[in-house]
């Protein structure tokens, strides 16, 4: 898989979040915290992580998932693994 | 009058069934004698012994966003749909602590009565629980591995999931319960709700039942028991209680909910009262895990105990919505129990119907749905006719409604709704007309 740009990861993540929990794509911006800002519960985060793994071709271990608190955290994590 | 002075009334009703996506459409279809039973179009259905069922008229996906349905088993989704209708019909405002599914409008009447969550209880039953979830998740597990199993699998398959979701959505903190007793489950839910209010634990209780387990495994398992009708060529004519040619029950899915309320609470807010939830009687056959006690003594006792709990006499009963699932032995055995329970003279005056002839058998949803029908029959003075009753069984010697709905006389009237379940559970709920 080609390395995705920050914008591509953001767009992909926003689509996944809309599909799973129904949050409008425009609300998913880098500074947003999944729990505090987007009100996503922990079980939905597990689903989102699985979908993100498929989409970006990276593995997100459960231990790591706990540290991915914001949209930017995920973008950074995916970019680091893809490069 | 029963031992407790608290009278319990019915102030809200809702349902989604094989006959309609809400209660008004269900009730009018029932009075019109329509059937909710149809052929299944599954892949591989030709290998099953039974190839039809009473599937929902309106699929939950038509009224609920896909994001909500990802985290709800089908039985839980329809429980919420029916509970929302009941809540709104009771004239309640959207719940103060409402935590409805994201992107869904909270149910309720703007400017309606604000229910105190601390005084609000929930009793929602399912006989089977999240069978679809359990089986679908196992398929995902086998095909894609454990990491692809939905993290919502456990809350979706647990049989108390529907009760939990209804409690969350309406902020009911007085207590949330899920009685599981097969096909008697939601009759018991109504009975338990009455007791919650009598005991002073709640002023308002959302109670009812839900079931959705129309799956090849169920068609195979019930089919192996020889319990289901195999009239595959004529699904709409398959459920025919009291008819000579009945050959078993028809599996159905759906949910029905009632809002029960202490009379004092309902009167104080000027609520519309559909009927009185007068009492409930229970018994256990302690005989066999699936067969009813052939003496019928347990069923008769449940009816007698319902009368005693409601402070009613046998001659007060004008109508019974029978359990009557269209099995060769069960239908007539129940009529004998009615005679034993009420006495021959009183039993002869009761107008009996069997609405499973049109809705199929909702298992854990049956007791609540048929309680709703019983309340409407008393309220509107109209008992739906049994469908497909063409050739009355010679052993039937009570008054079964045939061909068209039967009018009930005005004035004081009481009725029973019977539900019996695998395991030996017998429950009879007593209702009275609100005058």
Image: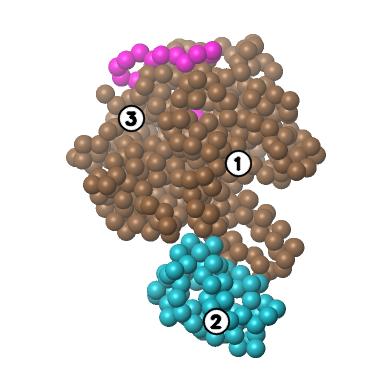
Chain colours: A cyan, B brown
Is there a contact, CB below 8 Å, between mark 2 and mark 3?
no
Magenta extent: B401-418
Quadrant in which the N terminus of chain B appears: top left
Dot 3: what SS? Answer: strand
Q: Which mark is residue B275?
A: 3
Instruction: Decide: is B88 above or below B247.
Output: below
Tell whether B229 sits left or right of A64.
right
Dot 2: what SS? Answer: helix
Q: Identify the residue position indicated by label 2 in the image.
A: A6
**B282 and B192: which is toward the camera:** B192
Of the two numbered discs 1 and 2 in the rendering, the one whose residue sits closer to the viewer: 2
Instruction: Decide: is B238 above or below B401.
Output: below
Q: Identify the residue position indicated by label 1 in the image.
A: B423
The dominant secondary structure in magenta is loop
Chain designation of label 2 = A
Mark 2, other Cα within 10 Å: few <14 / some 14–19 / many ≥20: some
Visible residue check, residue B425: no
Q: CA distance from mark 1 to mark 2?
A: 60 Å
x and y, in percent, of residue A35 in the image: 43, 74
């Amino acid at each position: 898989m080609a390395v995705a740009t920050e914008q591509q990861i953001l767009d992909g993540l926003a689509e996944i979040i809309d599909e799973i929990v129904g949050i409008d794509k425009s609300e998913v911006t880098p500074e947003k915290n999944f729990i505090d800002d987007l009100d996503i519960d922990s079980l939905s985060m597990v689903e989102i992580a699985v979908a993100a793994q498929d989409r970006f071709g990276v593995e997100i271990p459960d231990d790591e998932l706990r540290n991915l608190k914001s949209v930017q955290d995920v973008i950074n994590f995916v970019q680091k693994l893809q490069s | 009058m029963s031992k407790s002075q608290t009278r319990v009334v019915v102030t809200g009703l809702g349902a989604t069934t094989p006959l309609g996506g809400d209660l008004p459409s269900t009730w009018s279809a029932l009075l019109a004698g329509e059937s909710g039973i149809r052929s299944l179009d599954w892949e591989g259905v030709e290998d099953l012994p039974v190839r039809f069922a009473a599937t929902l008229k309106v699929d939950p996906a038509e009224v609920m966003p896909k994001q909500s349905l990802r985290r709800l088993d089908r039985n839980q989704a329809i429980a919420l749909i029916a509970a929302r209708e009941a809540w709104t019909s009771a004239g309640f405002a959207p719940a103060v602590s409402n935590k409805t599914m994201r992107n869904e409008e909270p149910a309720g009447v703007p400017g309606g009565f604000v229910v105190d969550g601390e005084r609000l209880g929930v009793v929602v039953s399912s006989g089977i629980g999240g069978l679809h979830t359990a089986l679908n998740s196992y398929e995902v597990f086998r095909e894609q591995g454990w990491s692809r199993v939905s993290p919502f699998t456990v809350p979706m398959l647990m049989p108390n999931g529907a009760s939990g979701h209804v409690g969350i959505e309406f902020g009911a903190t007085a207590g949330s319960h899920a009685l599981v007793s097969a096909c008697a489950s939601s009759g018991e839910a109504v009975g338990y709700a009455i007791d919650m209010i009598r005991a002073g634990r709640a002023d308002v209780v959302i109670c009812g039942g839900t079931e959705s387990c129309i799956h090849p495994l169920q068609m195979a398992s019930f089919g192996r028991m020889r319990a289901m009708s195999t009239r595959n060529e004529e699904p709409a004519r398959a459920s025919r209680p009291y008819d000579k040619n009945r050959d078993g029950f028809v599996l159905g899915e759906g949910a029905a909910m009632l809002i029960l309320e202490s009379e004092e609470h309902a009167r104080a807010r000027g609520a519309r009262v559909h009927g009185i939830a007068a009492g409930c009687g229970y018994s256990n056959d302690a005989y066999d895990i699936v067969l009813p006690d052939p003496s019928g003594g347990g069923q008769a006792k449940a009816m007698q105990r319902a009368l005693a709990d409601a402070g009613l006499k046998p001659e007060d009963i004008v109508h019974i919505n029978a359990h009557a699932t269209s099995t060769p032995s069960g239908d007539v055995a129940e009529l004998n129990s009615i005679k034993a329970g009420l006495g021959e003279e009183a039993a002869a005056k009761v107008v009996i119907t069997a609405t499973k002839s049109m809705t199929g058998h909702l298992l854990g949803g049956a007791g609540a749905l048929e309680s709703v029908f019983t309340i409407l029959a008393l309220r509107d003075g109209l008992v739906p006719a049994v469908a497909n009753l063409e050739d009355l069984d010679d052993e039937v010697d009570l008054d079964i409604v045939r061909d068209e709905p039967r009018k009930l006389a005005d004035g004081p009237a009481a009725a029973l709704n019977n539900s019996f379940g695998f395991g030996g559970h017998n429950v009879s709920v007593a209702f009275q007309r609100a005058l």
